[in-house]
Image (cartoon, rainbow, N blue to C red):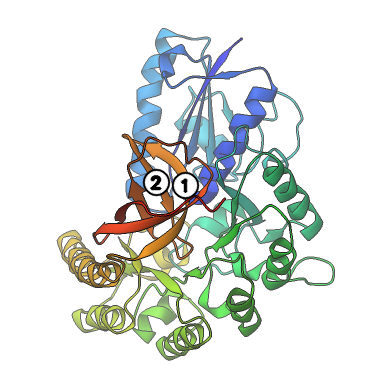
Amino acid sequence: MPYYHTWTIGCQMNKAESERLDSFLKQQNYQSTAVVEEASLVVLNSCVVRQSAENRVISKLNALRSLKRSRPNLTLALTGCLVNSDLQALRNKFPYVDYFFKPGETPQWLTGAAQLPKVLPYKPSPSTFVPIIQGCNNFCSYCIVPHRRGREKSRAIAEVLSEVKELVRRGVKEVILLGQNVDSYGHDLVGKPDLADLLGELNAMSGIARIRFLTSHPKDMSSKLIEAIANLGKVCKQISLPVQSGDNDILEAMRRGYTVEYYHQLVLEIRSRIPAVALSTDVIVGFPGESETQFQRTANLLRELKFDTVHVAAYSPRTGTLATREFKDNIPSDEKKKRLHIIEQLQEKIATQINAEFLGKVVLILVEEIKKGKWQGRTQDGKLVFFGDNGDYLGQLVEIKITKTSPWALQGKVELNTIN
């Protein structure tokens, strides 16, 4: 039986597609190996959302070039967002790579198989990703994703329900619905069902305990969707809502399609309808032309709204995007790093205060895996929890009394009997 090795970097969608790629390769009688030198097939699932990610992919490809020289029969394949429509340019740049295939596709040279979303993970985790919409129609000026994954294409509700039903049969307790812009789901389907409709169908499904989704775009977060999150018991009270900047001029230059005032009002509406909601956001610092005053507006917004989690990144020019054509990347690297560090320190203080409120409380977590001798899982609002115990808790809902908190996670001990 031949061996394969996969290497994945990037977003949850990449991880979901790699899980399905693993299943596909096993169906083709390949066996997985963590040792790249043992593999007859090596697949890299790439990310180019930032230069740092692209650099890591290219570094990995360069390392594999040496392996290919010593083992000419080794098959190298590249997928993910580094693969664009100009395949000839990729072949010229990486002549030692045997095959290129676009995100979400299967290795067509092995079999003429269907798209990856129809192939389920081989051994699904208790919490499993389910892609429901591919691509993005927004074309934010800094973002390469629409150029690599194309326009939005939703999967039919019946198809998603069928997949989740099978995952539940295999032991999955929680599904995480994925899309580059997940809350625009359904607009391209007959009858135009939306994400709230899909959540309602999944909420009624027996066997599923929890439902999450990401990532949302503020301009597409409807009142109907907010009501669904508030009223559907299995839908986790956790929302990812990237703001990117706290300054209106920067938001306009980013082509985000909303103002700071709109975003602020949206957060107030969400918290009014879902008081216990956990909100996370994304921020880009050092966008072309961002002044110190504009940056401070972003910091002030985060200070005021107090998110549970903030993912911050320094602006990275992406060839082919509108921002690289219209704006000069004129914020020095050291200044970007300084601003990023300021946001990280600010959020660490905020998260410390938020998580400290859990000390001594009992929380219900879904146990997802064991690492370094400790079980780990998440609360319904997404808090990462670790606990040590000799029992077998994989895939179970367990009540944990929190004994220690930090900005990043909670720790505790089993308090009551397992719920399920």
Q: Residue 376 carries which label?
A: 2
Observer-nearest of 80 and 308:
308
* Residue type marked 2: Gln
How far apart are the alpha carbons under marks 2 and 1?
6 Å
Q: How many marks?
A: 2
Q: In this view, does 286 lie to the left or right of 209?
A: left
Locate residue 271 relative to residue 361 in the image: left or right.
right
Q: Residues within 10 Å of mark 1 (few under 14, many from 20)?
A: many
Q: In which quarter of the image is the N terminus?
A: top right
Q: Residue at x 46, y 62 (%)?
A: 143
Callout 2: few (<14), some (14-19), or many (20+) C-alpha neighbours within 10 Å?
many
Image coordinates of residue 326 in percent, x first then y, are 41, 70
The answer to which of marks 2 and 1 sits earlier in the sequence is: 1
Circle 1 sits on which residue?
367
Residue at (67, 69) in percent of width and height:
195
Q: Viewed as shown, does residue 307 lie left or right of 192?
A: left
Indicate which disc residue 346 carries. Answer: none
Q: How far across and down, in percent of the image, does residue 348 sit?
A: 22, 66
